[in-house]
């Protein structure tokens, strides 16, 4: 069930984000989904007897929440105003590659094998191909694409930190605390960007409102809970397989329901990038 959530559920959130930012400012979308989910989970934990998180837990939650939800969710929400959801998902699919690189470079992890090195190269070549204009393909915003690529690094850094962190013995608190902190930071960014003043509730479409609700339920509450559960109980390489499925789900849903075009070069880039991800994280 947890794999189903991060495979299909997370894959569908890319289209939901694109719909939401159509009439709601992007940083506010990120703040809403994480802050509401974080308050709900931490509140549930405290209400059932969990102790108040320690100062160390709050510090760790700030680092994890900033990497996962500010640098990733906030950036993706902003980029989704400029790029199709399928392209965004393909760029985010490089997260496992960055996990391998960051774990080796900064945490003393195992040096990538020759097979992994080839996979890393293919993965990054596939990402670069997405920046190349193609006839009949989707229009790609290069700045938004670069922001999305950087967002993948943020998620990778947050994943490595979350894997070794201990925020609470109570699952709901450990899961919700980074979302709560990340949502608060995104709310501050949203206010600083003037989004709270420019938002007109009457302009928010029903689709955008339902999309935010879906992001809270599937993307944050269910998705992040499943992700942390799998990180604690499964090999990281197996958890990283969600990166093969998310772009496929996003491309199909974007084309079927979002009116997005999928060009030949996009499919080629997807094949190269996902092959690279597979080689970089698979043992055999």
Image: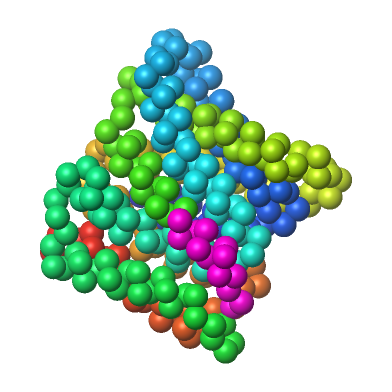
Whether 14 is among the magenta residues is no
Image coordinates of residue 141 in percent, x first then y, are: 59, 70
| Direction right: furthest residue | 202
* Residue 137 in the figure: left or right of residue 240: right
| Direction bottom: furthest residue | 135
- Which quadrant: the N terminus? top left
Chief secondary structure of the magenta span? helix
Q: Nearer the viewer, residue 102 or 164?
A: 102
Count of numbered circles in the view = 0
Q: Examine the rendered structure and indicate whether residue 118 appears above or below residue 135.
A: above
* Residue 73 in the figure: left or right of residue 230: right
Q: How is the image coloured?
A: rainbow
**Residue at the spot x=48%, y=14% of the render?**
46
Q: Examine the rendered structure and indicate whether residue 151 appears above or below residue 247.
A: above
In the image, the segment drawn in magenta is 138-150
Q: Nearer the viewer, residue 2 or 192?
A: 192
Residue 22 sits in which quadrant? bottom right
Q: Nearer the viewer, residue 267 or 26?
A: 26
* Residue 260 in the figure: left or right of residue 246: right
**Residue at the spot x=59%, y=78% of the render?**
138
């Amino acid at each position: 069930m947890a794999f189903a959530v991060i495979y299909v559920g997370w894959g569908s959130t890319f289209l939901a984000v694109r719909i939401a930012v159509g009439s709601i400012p992007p940083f506010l979308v990120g703040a809403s989904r994480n802050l509401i989910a974080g308050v709900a989970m931490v509140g549930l934990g405290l209400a059932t007897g969990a102790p108040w998180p320690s100062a160390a837990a709050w510090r760790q939650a700030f680092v994890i929440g900033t990497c996962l939800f500010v640098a990733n969710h906030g950036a993706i929400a902003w980029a989704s105003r400029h790029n199709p959801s399928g392209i965004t998902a393909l760029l985010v699919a490089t997260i496992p590659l960055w996990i391998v690189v960051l774990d080796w470079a900064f945490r003393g992890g195992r040096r990538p094998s020759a097979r992994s090195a080839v996979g890393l190269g293919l993965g990054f070549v596939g990402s670069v191909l997405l920046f190349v204009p193609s006839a009949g393909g989707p229009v790609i915003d290069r700045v938004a694409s670069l922001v999305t690529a950087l967002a993948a690094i943020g998620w990778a850094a947050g994943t490595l930190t979350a894997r070794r962190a201990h925020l609470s013995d109570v699952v709901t608190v450990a899961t919700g605390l980074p979302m709560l902190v990340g949502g608060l930071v995104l709310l501050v960014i949203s206010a600083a960007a003037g989004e709270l003043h420019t938002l007109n509730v009457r302009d928010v479409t029903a689709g955008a409102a339902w999309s935010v609700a879906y992001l809270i339920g599937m993307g944050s509450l269910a998705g992040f809970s499943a992700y942390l559960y799998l990180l604690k109980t499964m090999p990281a390489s197996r958890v990283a397989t969600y990166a093969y499925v998310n772009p496929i789900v996003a491309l199909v849903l974007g084309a079927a329901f979002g009116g997005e075009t999928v060009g030949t070069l996009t499919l080629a880039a997807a094949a190269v990038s996902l092959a690279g991800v597979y080689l970089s994280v698979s043992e055999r």
